[in-house]
Image (cartoon, rainbow, N blue to C red):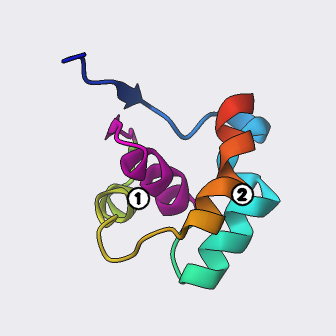
Amino acid sequence: KGIALMAYSPLGLGKESLLTDPVVKSIAETKGVAPSQVALKYLVQKGYAVLPMSSSEERLRLNMDLFSFDLSEEEMKRLEPLAKAN
């Protein structure tokens, strides 16, 4: 209680990255957003503060644009097993 959880560099690294997961990619295509936005939006909708890292200005802009869409309950449920695995 009273403790805010923060996800630091939450997108993963290497070939095991959430960004290449078929579920994340499918939701991103449906929403017309990047896979990174789907992964970050999941965390925001779960109530986490997120601190994504990137050396690319374009990716930083994408990472900040999380409030132009929402994930449905069904999409959140599809992403849940990925969060537990990572």
Q: Which mark is residue 78?
A: 2
Percent of width and height locating residue 80:
66, 45
* Image side of residue 15 versus residue 66, left or right: right
Q: Which mark is residue 59?
A: 1
Secondary structure under tag 2 reads helix
* Image side of residue 61 versus residue 26, left or right: left
Q: Residue at x 51, y 75 (%)?
A: 33
Give residue 63's quadrant in the image: bottom left
Q: Residue at x 34, y 41 (%)?
A: 47
Percent of width and height locating residue 22:
81, 61
Examine the rendering and report whether any part of residue 47 can be seen.
yes
Q: Which residues are magenta?
A: 35-53
C-alpha separation, residue under disc 2 versus residue under disc 1: 24 Å
Of all residues, the one furthest to the left in this rendering is 2
Examine the rendering and report whether any part of residue 86 can be seen.
no
Within 10 Å of disc 1 (Cα), the crowding (few <14, some 14-19, many 20+) is some
